[in-house]
Amino acid sequence: MTDLTPTGFLTIGDASLEYKWLAPQAADAPTIVMLHEGLGSVGLWGDFPDKLREATGAGIFAYSRAGYGQSSAAALPRPLDYMQREALEVLPAVLDAIGFRRGLLLGHSDGGSIAAIYAGAHQDHRLQGIALIAPHFIVEDVSVTSIAAIKTAYETTDLKARLARWHKDVDNAFYGWNRAWLDPKFRDWDISEYLAYVRVPVLVVQGVDDQYGTLRQIEIAQDECYCPVDLKVISGAGHSPHREAPGATLDAIEQFARAALRDDQGLQGRAA
């Protein structure tokens, strides 16, 4: 990996993207690149990156996409293929900029979709697996219903103020995501075609009570992927299992990482 400060900004195209870097326990250890949810940011991962580093010994790199956190704003309205653009144009540049040599992509929600698109579109020898937390491959009715409800909450409750703690331009973050998902044309959004081209192991973590997606998303991964697909369905968790059931989620990712990254190539952590 390129020498990175613990926090900073990357210039990718016209965007300035904030990042957090947790160095690995061993110099030759792999890197886990974290891709946040549709309203997420570096800060909103909380202490999960630190727990992940402790559990695996891997280096952890998290960044805020344009429009989120302290990164520069995104042009609105977002195009309806914004996740494809992120996976095909921005993420490759980020990986090259940080000197990514080998490791995993770990994505939550939109970030999981971006990770899946990247893995299907790029036969990247550096990539050894993708871990997807509550990913979307298609748009479901429950997704649209919940996203419409959160728009009402954003405009009528203290949700905007709470999100403003994590985003420099909270309206840019919220409406960039929300208006894309609520556009009637977005109902046709479907990235399942990428799954057939994924050539690395996949982990899907899904909460039983996910208010933004059903177990249909898992079924799609099983149906479309030719590569190994590990599943972890967590009772009592909704759309953010890493916050609602952090122990079970961390255990699933640690076990997957050990298998995908192979302990004999520098992965360390609690079980070492």
Image (tube, grey):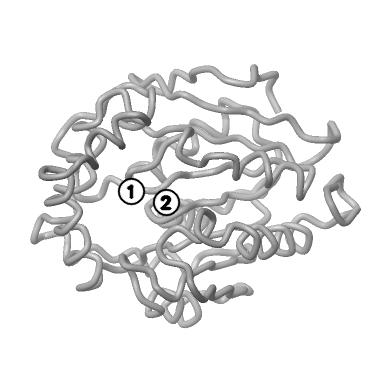
| CB within 8 Å, label 2 to label 1 | yes
Q: Where is residue 237 in the image (x, y as percent from the top left)?
A: 47, 68
Nearest the eye: 192 or 125: 192
Which amino acid does the dot numbered 2 rest on?
Ile
Label ID, residue 104: none
Q: Position of residue 136 (x, y in %)?
A: 36, 64
Q: Is residue 165 left or right of residue 95?
A: left
User: Residue 197, relative to residue 7: is it above or below?
Assistant: below
Residue labelled with disc 2: 114
Q: Which of marks 2 and 1 is nearer the N terminus?
A: 1
Instruction: Classify the position of the N terminus by image quarter.
Output: top right
**Mark 2, other Cα within 10 Å: few <14 / some 14–19 / many ≥20:** many
Residue labelled with disc 1: 83
Residue found farthest to the front: 158
**Mark 1, other Cα within 10 Å: few <14 / some 14–19 / many ≥20:** many
Which amino acid does the dot numbered 1 rest on?
Met
Q: Position of residue 226 (x, y in %)?
A: 56, 76
Quadrant hosting residue 32: top right
Nearest the eye: 33 or 43: 43
Q: In this view, does 46 lie to the left or right of 220?
A: right
Q: What element carries label 1?
A: helix
Residue found farthest to the left: 184
Q: Position of residue 61 (x, y in %)?
A: 60, 35
Look at 34% across and 32% down and name the residue there.
68
Q: What element carries label 2?
A: helix
Look at 48% across and 72% down and name the residue there.
236
